[in-house]
Image (spheres, rainbow, N blue to C red):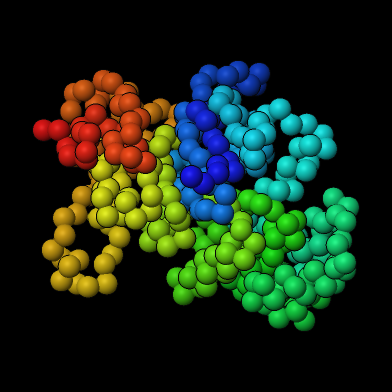
Amino acid sequence: MSEALLTVDHLKMYFPVQKGLLKRTVGWVKAVDDVSFTVERGKTLGIVGESGSGKSTIGHCVVRDYNAAGGSVTFDGINMADCKGRELQKLRQKIQMVNQDPYSSLDPRMNVGQLITEGPRYHHYPQNKETFDEKVERLLGLVDLNPSYADRFPHEFSGGQRQRIAIARALAMEPDFIVCDEVVSALDVSIQAQVVSLLMEPQRTLGLTYIFIGHDLSVVRYISDNVAVLYLGKVMEYTSSDELYENPLHPYTKALISAVPIPDPVVDRARERILLKGEIPRPIDPPKGCNFCTRCPYATNECRGQEPEYREIAPGHFVACHRVMEGGGMRG
Ligand code: SF4
C-alpha cells in the first residue's frame, strides 16, 4: 500500500461576515466544511468544482496561508497546526503553490533569473554544487524555456510562458508537494495540454506529489490519480480518476461529466445529459439538508431536510448522497 504524504482530516475553514462600523460578526461563510482526503506520495489528487465550491481555500489551508477553523492537515507525519518558526518555514519550502494568474503572481520589476532564485536566496538554501545561474539554466530547461530568457522581464512573455516561469519558481524550492491552483484555467486550450505535460514530467523524474485544482474535468482527469468533487465546501464524491469518469455515482458528478463534450458527435448526441438548474447557492446561505438539493433533479423531501452521510459505497469510492445505494445504484 502506498504511503500518504498529505492527510486532510475533517478540515473546516470559516470566514466571518462582518457588518457596521464596529465590524460585528453577523454570520459565517463555510468555505470548507468537514473535508477529508489523503494524497499518496508521488500521486496527484484532482479537486474539481464550480467557482465558489471552496477548492482554492483548501489549497491555501494546505500551504498554511490560512489557519484552519477545525480539523487538521498532516504533511509527512507532521501536524501543520503545531508548526512554528523554523519548522514551519522548512515545511513551507517543501509545499509550494502555483496560482491561476501568471500575470499577477510574478513581480514585474524582477527578471526571470531573479524570480526563480528569489525563494532559495531568501531561505539561504545551501547550493549543492549548483550556482544560482546554473539553477536558473536547469529550471528554464525543465519548463521548456530558453535559458537566455533569464535576463528578461515578465511582460515580455505570453501567458503560457509566464505560467512556466511560475512553475520553475516553485521547483526552485525543491519541493515535495505542489498545489496547482487552476494553473491552466486562464490559458488557451492549445497551451493547457503543454503546461499539464510540463507538470507531469518533473512528477515522474523527481517524484513530486500534487493537488491539481481545476474546473475542467477533462484536464483534471488527464493528470489526476484520484479526484474529489467539491460542492459548496463539501466533498460530494471521491474515487480514482478512472472510476469517477467511468462510473460516476453522485448526481452532481454525473451532471458535470455529462456536460463534457465528446469528440464523436454520434456518441455525444446519444448520451444522457443532466442539466443543472440555476447557480451554485451563496456559501453564506447554504440550503438545509443536502448542499446540492436546490439543483438536484433527484431531490426528495429527505434531501431537503437531512444532510447525507459521506459513505464508502464501494472500495475506495466515497459518495455523499441519500439515494446512492451500496454497490452504486440509485434508490427509487
Ligand atoms: Fe440529490 Fe438528494 Fe443525493 Fe443530494 S442527497 S445529491 S439532493 S439525491
- On the image, the x and y values in percent for residue 190 come to 46, 75
- On the image, the x and y values in percent for residue 40 come to 53, 46
Residue at position x 66%, y 38% from top?
A: 64
Q: Is residue 197 above or below residue 248?
A: below
Report how many numbered discs are placed on residues in the image.
0
- On the image, the x and y values in percent for residue 218 come to 38, 61
Query: Quick check: can you spot residue 72?
Result: yes
Q: Quadrant of residue 58?
A: top right
Q: Quadrant of residue 67?
A: top right
Outermost residue toward the front in this view: 1
- On the image, the x and y values in percent for residue 84 come to 78, 31
> In the drawing, does residue 215 fall left or right of residue 242?
right
Q: Nearer the viewer, residue 286 or 226?
A: 226
Q: Nearer the viewer, residue 195 or 75?
A: 75
Residue at position x 77%, y 75% from top?
A: 137
Outermost residue toward the left in this view: 332
Q: Is residue 243 above or below residue 307?
A: below
Q: Is residue 20 above or below residue 275?
A: above
Query: Quick check: can you spot residue 111?
Result: no
Q: Quadrant of residue 130?
A: bottom right
> In the drawing, does residue 243 fall left or right of residue 226?
left
Residue at position x 72%, y 70% from top?
A: 139
Residue at position x 26%, y 67% from top?
A: 262
Q: Nearer the viewer, residue 61 or 138?
A: 138
The C terminus is located in which quarter?
top left
